[in-house]
Amino acid sequence: MAFDIREIQTQLEAAPIVSPYSHDLALAILCDTFRLAKVRPPSRADWGAMEDKARSPLWREQVVMLAHVLVSSALRQETVQVLQQNDDATTLLQRFFQDVAPLTAEMIRSNTFRREEFIRKWVRVVGGKCTGESPKGSVARIEQLDYRKAEAEMRRAEEARKKEADKRQQALREAEQRATEARGWRE
Amino acid sequence: MAGVTNVLAADLRVAPRANIRRDTSSQRPHIPWAEAIAEGLTRFASLADEDAARADLDARLSGLRDALRDSPYHARRLHAAGLHPGDLQTLDDLRHLPFLDREALAANWDAVPTPPSDADECVVVKSSGSIGAPVNVVRDRRDCLHMWAVLRFLVTRVGAALPPHPRVVLLDALPGGLEYSVRLPILHDGALHRISVLREDALQRLRRVRPAVLFSDPEGLRWLAAQPGVPTPRLVLTSAQHLPAGLREELANAVPAPVLNYYATTETGPLAWECPRPEAPGRFHVLAPDVWLEPGLDEVVVTRLRPSVLPLLRYLPGDAGSVRRDACACGFHGWTLEHFGGRGACHFVTPSGREVDAWALAWVFKHHALRGFRLTQVDVSHFRLELAGASPSDVAPLRERLAGALRNLGWTQPSLDVCHVEVSALAAGTKPQPFRRLR
């Protein structure tokens, strides 16, 4: 079975924006998903340990959003099909939450790219394939979307810009002094 | 520097000093680029396969992604929305990205550009003060030369053949009266002459120059149509937004040359040209692959695909119009802008009964810091100027410059009332209407 990302996105666009599930209910939904695939779900202690390990204020909202996207689309059904009985639910979830660490619930709700990233990272972590894509293509798409990587790049670019800020201001000042006053395109 | 303004009569001195580049030989390294731009436009205008065209345009987004990353404003804006430049992989992705409107560009003019390098030879130009708040627009050298590259394409498009060393005239009806002549290596080693119709010897100069290409606005074209024995250029261009059929006819009788109307803004450069078929007026063919105008919307949304120091992502010039894929009877394949509603037309009437395009005065306002303005012709020689956010020290010079401009255009004794208003009092719909005439 392959995950149809476009179809899942369409289903999610039609679903309520805000997850109606509380944290506890979200945990129950995730546990049930594993149970349906005959995989032992994380225990309460495992969940606690996962939260401690994540040390992220976003972890709880990500759990709630994962439950929401699973229930509101074919993602849950496909996940159940793909999960293997010997999968370790806790390891798998830890890897997923690490992967989506910087994504907020708001981003997943309102931003089509972050929602796609969230879904694709889930598909990757459960070992699924995407409809109409080569494995290489799916990896490349996750690379394009990867917000954590992009954030690091943007931070680096911002630091470089700060270092160059004076030079930049100077260049713009000079450009302003060279200002032309005609209608623009003349030389 | 152009020294022309100091030979004018005192009344004509309404223009500030202008910088004219004289080191025109520095255009030469950009000639292969200009040829490539023209070839790209020609190829796209005959590309019937939409998928192929889109794939080519998608490939051009990679440069834009880099520019967005390097632009402090765009990087900040995208980050705030949980986006990053890598999200932009196809033209379809654009609809999920934020718009850039004119006010935001005005407020962040120095943060939108990528870091300018010495090689970019950037300048800052001011867009016209059509909403009273001129926008500083940073341009690199190729932005400044881009129109010449587009001109190569347009010349081919209308089937005109330019002579060696073509002379281009910019026939100017603006009240500044600025004139100059420079070499133009980038257009087949030609020359550019700016001629002001306000000068007594304008017709003689025009006859002497015998231009192969003539640019003007409707006011200049009207003047041209009324002159006896004007030389016939191979191509006449105007960026009138609305070129009245009557004026086209009038001009065709006096100057039997193809007239091409194009749509451009200072912020974006040229965007589209009006289909020359007389039965299809008001349809503007988009200048892809240099720019992308988003289809299916009811206003113009511009993304610049050509590399530039000023990355424009979903820029809103404030013009209404809708874009769709088109296979036009003129032979053009591509995207066409229809139902184009540019700036609101307004004509003032001089004491002699001549109609003057009020937008010729917009240029006066961009030299002053304002939040908004409206100039109303109340009576033949009586104007009311409403200003929002003008500093008191600016009012006297603005009044003087505007009165000078009106005198240059034919009002011998203009009377001008100036009053201060809130900017909200000037808002009238989405499109600024800074000029009006009470009838």
Image (tube, helix red, strand yellow):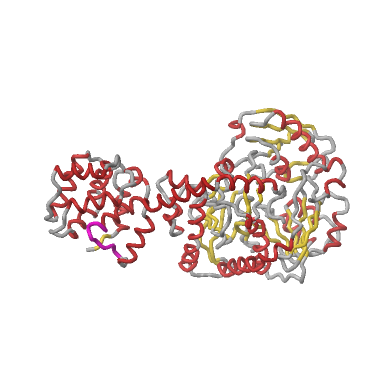
Left-right relation of B116 to A36: right
**Residue at horizontal 24 percent and vertical 54 percent from the top:** A75
**Residue at horizontal 71 percent and vertical 40 percent from the top:** B367
Left-right relation of A16 to B295: left
Identify which residue, A168 or B278, lies in the foreground.
A168
Considering every residue shown, the one lying at the far front of the view is A163
Q: In the rendered image, which quarter contains the N terminus of chain A?
A: bottom left
Q: Which residues are magenta?
A: A124-131
Q: In the rendered image, which quarter contains the C terminus of chain A?
A: bottom right
Number of numbered labels in the structure image: 0
**Residue at horizontal 84 percent and vertical 35 percent from the top:** B413
Residue B16 visible in the current orientation: yes
Give the vertical position of B116 relative to B41 (above or below).
above
Give the vertical position of A171 relative to B142 (above or below).
above
Give the percent coordinates (x, y) of residue B377: 73, 36
Snapshot quadrant of residue A146: bottom left
Give the percent coordinates (x, y) of residue B383: 75, 33
Left-right relation of A6 to B118: left
Identify which residue, B114 or A7, lies in the foreground.
B114
Give the percent coordinates (x, y) of residue B219: 75, 50
Identify which residue, A96 or B279, lies in the foreground.
A96
Residue B263 visible in the current orientation: no
Q: Is residue B355 magenta?
A: no
Left-right relation of B371 to A17: right
Q: Is residue A128 magenta?
A: yes
Give the percent coordinates (x, y) of residue B149: 65, 63
